[in-house]
Every structure is written in C-alpha cells, then in structure tokens.
C-alpha cells in the first residue's frame, strides 16, 4: 500500500515537473539585423524574463559560434519576475551576404538548461565583383578578360573607377547591361609572371566611400595546364 | 676489335665486359638515354603515387582499386627496366616490358582522347603538361621506336646475372 | 625465348618489392577502395601526401594564427578577407591544391573561406581539412 502511494506521488510530481513552464522566457530567440552599408559591427539584443518563482542563474559566459561575435551578460542572477537582456555584438569584418551566428546560453533552469540564440545579419553590399580574380597562363594570348561589377541590392551604380597597382595591366571600364559595369583587364604581355591588385571605387551617389579589390595575374612560365 | 668465333650466329659470344662488334657504342648510348628517361619518369611517379593513381583513373578504363595498386607498382617496374637498359642486366626482359608498357599506354591514350576524356598524361608528371597532345603522341612513338631498335640489336649472350 | 620470359618475370617480381614497401607506407594515406570523392573534405594523411607546393590556409582568427600555425600556412579569414586575399592569389596556380583548416571553435570558417575562394575568386582544387587545426596538432605529438 505504502509503496504504491509513493510510486503514485513520484509519478505525479515528475509529471508536474516535466510539464511546468520554463522559468526563463525569451522574447525572441532569433534577432534579424540590417546593419548600414559599411558598418563595422551589428548589435543584437535578446530580451528575457524570469516568469518562474525561483531565481535563475546563468552558468558561465555565453558561447558564440565564432570569434567575431561577442555576447555579454548583464548579470548572472535573474530574480523571479525580473527582466534582462543579453547583448551580442557581431564584428562584421569583410563578411558578405546573410550571416548567421549563434550564441549558446546555459542556465540552471531545469526546463531549459540550454538556449541557442541566433543573430541573423544581412550584410549590405555596395558592389560585387565577378570574378574577383583573373589570370592568364604563361604564353596565353594576351586578350582582355572581363570582371563584372554588379551593384548590391537596392544600390544603383553611377560609375566605377578602377586603378591598377602595376602598369603591367590595363583596366578599362565600360557600362554593361542592367546597370552593371564591365572592367576589361589586359596584361601587357604574358611572357613572364606578373601580378597586380586592381582598386575598384564604386560611385553610387551615397556618401559611403568603400573600396573593393580584384586581382590580376600572369602565371609563371612552366606551370601551364595541359 | 674482338675476334668473334661463330660469326654466323646473330648473337655473338662475348667475354664479360667487352662489347661485340655489332653492339656498338651508338646502341649503348641509345639504351642509356631511353633507360634514363624511363627511370626519370618512374621516379617522378614514385614521388606522387596518389597523383599517378588519379591520372590512371582519368582514363576510365580500370576500376579504382586496380588502378591505385598499379599506381604504386608500375613506376617501380619502369625504374627497374630502365636500370636494366643501362646496366644491361636483365636487358632483354627490360626492353620487352618497356615495349609492352609503351604500346599499351599509346593505345590507351589514343582511345581516351577519342572518348573525349580530359587526361593530363601523367607519364612525365606535370612537367610535360605544356606539351600538346600531338607532341606527346610523337614523343611516345619516338620512345616506342627507340625501344624497338634496341629490341633488334644483337645482345650479349644472356646468362649474366645481377 | 626462355631467357626473355625468365628475365621479364624476374623484373616483374623484383619490382613488387619496393612497390609493396611503398604501399605499406601509404596504407593509411590512400583510399584503396574508392576514388577520393569529389567532396571538399580531405583527411590529414591525404593532405600530407600531396605535393610540397600545396597551399595551406589558416582560416582562424589572427591571434590564434600568430600563436601557432601550420608552417608555411597563409592566414585568410573573413575578418580581413579583402586585405589577406591578394597574398593567397599571388601564389595560387591552377595545378596547386589548396587546403584550408580552422579550429573547432571557428570550424564553420574553413567552409566559408572555401566557398568564397571558389565562388568569388574562381579557384579550383580547394579542400577543407577534416579535423582542422586539432587534427594537425594531434598528429604532431
């Protein structure tokens, strides 16, 4: 009789514990950011509230998926009913496109010991170079090769200015289809190894003066493909 | 130079270390050059067996498990046969095997090109990559021709051991 | 004819010895059953068996690179992609292979770098090291 009661009570309490709502509730576990063109970093804020009736503690600092993202706690303990936030700073660097970085938070909340927060950043691109690298084999005909300069989403390119780091390569810009620009690169000759960095300055009418780079090379002799 | 008895026999009796009249210095030089070429080709492949395995695979004639084992074996065979040509030890066997290898390789190359496969020879490693296909084939036929010449030269009476 | 056969068989047999020795040495470095998949991953033994002009790229943050890196590796990460890319492009050639590694902390990075090198710079033969920096460190011990 006693054993059965104990069993019954344990099952009931287990059931209550398992289905009890989480103490720490997050307003959003994914935050989407649209940093301005050329911004060096983007900040996402993850808000939480302790809706339980015991204090919740964070276990250690949050872990981020890459060294480029740092996340800071306001404080370790969250009292019942208290609200707070975790700030995540994403250092964009030279990243492009849609970037997803995660922040993993550990707590002593039995319902939700681990929470993964996601920072989604849409990195605006002023310009995209396709490709960013052109090369000629040694002895290959020194015909011009084209790099296409495409405007980023929502950007209109007025012009593109290209300078070569070495006189061995010439770069001529001409307008292309659909508001793009064609950069025609040509080496003076393909008899010896040459290397140049092309500096591309887009003019999109915005104040942002961001510079892009492309590379041009003539491969050294003796390494030609079959 | 050397008084040879039994001149009517195509292969002459030679004393150890002395060349028979028909086996002149010219043939010897040819043997050394061709032998040296095969040793060179073999060594290059020994240094990068995985690369050679890939080259064999490009011909799409042999299944990979066989091709990869051949990639480890063939270069050493080439080297030994090349040595055979130079030292004249196991000379006939060396010429014979190299001739067979060249013939098979030339056929495989022509067939692969006919199938439109992208093969980068692999025979002389990537040093020969800048030779066009025609030049490659010409070089291969030249080697085969040289081997056939060596095949027909009178040889020292075999019995010489390593 | 008999001599010819004997000599040929002797050569064929003798060649087996160094070949078997070499195959033994490479037994863990080669895929014996299937050709290397066209995937982008490469194991450390495979990458180490490649020729000496393979380009090694470190995709980790700069401070990790400066602390220690594979000898001869070039740093290329997304923080300073624009600045670091030219030095990689300056040494690349179509017949060279590129091996990228990162640490388990930043392991999405190698694949990102590989993807960008293929897509933006049009490079071929770009591979990601399986096990990353940790695999290389462990092998060195």
Image: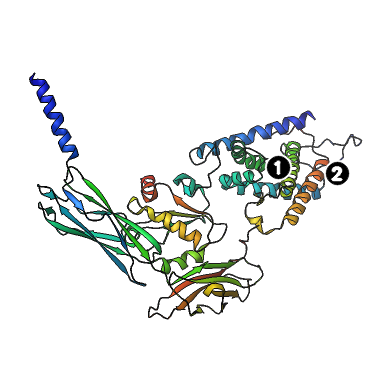
- What residue is pinned by disc 1? B87
User: Which class describes the residues within 10 Å of circle 1: few (<14), some (14-19), or many (20+)?
Assistant: some
Total marks drawn?
2
- What residue is pinned by disc 2? B22
Q: Nearer the viewer, residue B116 or B44?
A: B116
Which residue appears at 19% of the width and 55% of the height? A48
Please say if A4 is above or below A144: above
Which residue appears at 59% of the width and 37% of the height? B69
The image position of residue B70, as x and y in percent, is 62, 38
Task: Please state, as top left, top right, bottom left or bottom right, where the C terminus of chain A lies in the image.
Answer: bottom right
Which residue appears at 64% of the width and 56% of the height? B127
Secondary structure category for the residue under label 2: loop
The image position of residue B73, as x and y in percent, is 62, 38
- Badge 1: chain ID: B
Q: Earlier in the sequence, mark 2 or mark 1?
A: 2
Q: Residue lying at the far top in this picture: please name it.
A: A1
Drawn side of residue B99 relative to residue C41, left or right: right
**Residue A190 showing in the rendered view:** yes
Drawn side of residue C79 relative to residue C55, left or right: left
User: Which class describes the residues within 10 Å of circle 2: few (<14), some (14-19), or many (20+)?
Assistant: some
């Amino acid at each position: 009789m006693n054993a059965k009661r104990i069993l019954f009570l344990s099952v009931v309490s287990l059931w209550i514990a398992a289905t009890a709502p989480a103490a720490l509730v997050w307003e959003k576990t994914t935050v989407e950011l649209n940093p301005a063109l050329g911004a060096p970093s983007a900040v996402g804020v993850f808000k939480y509230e302790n809706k339980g009736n015991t204090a919740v503690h964070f276990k250690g600092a949050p872990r981020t998926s890459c060294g480029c993202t740092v996340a800071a706690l306001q404080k370790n303990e969250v009292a019942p009913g208290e609200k707070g936030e975790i700030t995540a700073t994403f250092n964009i660097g030279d990243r492009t496109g849609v970037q997803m970085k995660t922040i993993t938070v550990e707590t002593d909340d039995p319902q939700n010991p681990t929470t993964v927060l996601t920072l989604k950043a849409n990195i605006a691109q002023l310009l995209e170079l396709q490709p960013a690298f052109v090369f000629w084999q040694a002895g290959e005909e020194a015909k011009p090769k084209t790099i296409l300069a495409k405007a980023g989403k929502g950007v209109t390119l007025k012009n593109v200015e290209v300078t070569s780091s070495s006189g061995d390569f010439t770069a001529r810009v001409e307008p292309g289809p659909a508001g793009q620009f064609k950069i025609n690169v040509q080496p003076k000759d393909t008899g010896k190894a040459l290397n140049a960095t092309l500096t591309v300055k887009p003019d999109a009418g915005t104040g942002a003066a961001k510079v892009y780079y492309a590379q041009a090379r003539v491969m050294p002799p003796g390494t030609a493909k079959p | 130079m050397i008084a040879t008895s039994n001149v009517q026999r195509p292969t002459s009796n030679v004393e150890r270390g002395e060349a028979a009249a028909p086996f002149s210095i010219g043939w010897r030089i040819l043997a050394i050059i061709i032998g040296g070429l095969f040793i060179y080709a073999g060594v290059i492949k020994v240094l990068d067996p995985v690369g050679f395995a890939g080259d064999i695979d490009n011909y799409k004639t042999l299944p990979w498990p066989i091709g990869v084992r051949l990639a480890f074996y063939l270069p050493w065979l080439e080297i030994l046969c090349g040595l055979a040509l130079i030292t004249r030890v196991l000379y006939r066997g060396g010429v014979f095997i190299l001739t067979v290898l060249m013939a098979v390789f030339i056929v495989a190359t022509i067939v692969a090109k006919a199938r439109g496969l992208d093969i980068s020879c692999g025979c002389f490693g990537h040093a020969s990559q800048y030779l066009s296909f025609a030049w490659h084939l010409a070089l291969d036929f030249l080697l085969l021709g040289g081997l056939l010449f060596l095949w027909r030269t009178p040889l020292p009476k075999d019995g010489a051991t390593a | 004819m008999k001599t010819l056969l004997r000599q040929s068989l002797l050569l064929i047999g003798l060649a087996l010895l160094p070949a078997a020795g070499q195959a033994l040495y490479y037994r863990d470095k080669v895929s014996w059953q299937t050709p290397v998949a066209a995937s982008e991953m490469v194991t450390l033994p495979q990458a180490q068996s490649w020729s000496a002009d393979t380009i090694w790229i470190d995709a980790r943050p700069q401070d990790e690179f400066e602390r220690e890196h594979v000898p001869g590796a070039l740093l290329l990460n997304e923080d300073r992609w624009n600045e670091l890319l030219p030095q990689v492009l300056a040494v690349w050639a179509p017949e060279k292979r590129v091996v990228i590694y990162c640490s388990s902390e930043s392991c999405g990075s190698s694949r990102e770098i590989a993807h960008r090198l293929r897509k933006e710079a049009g490079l071929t033969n770009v591979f990601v090291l399986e096990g990353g920096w940790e695999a290389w460190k462990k092998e060195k011990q």
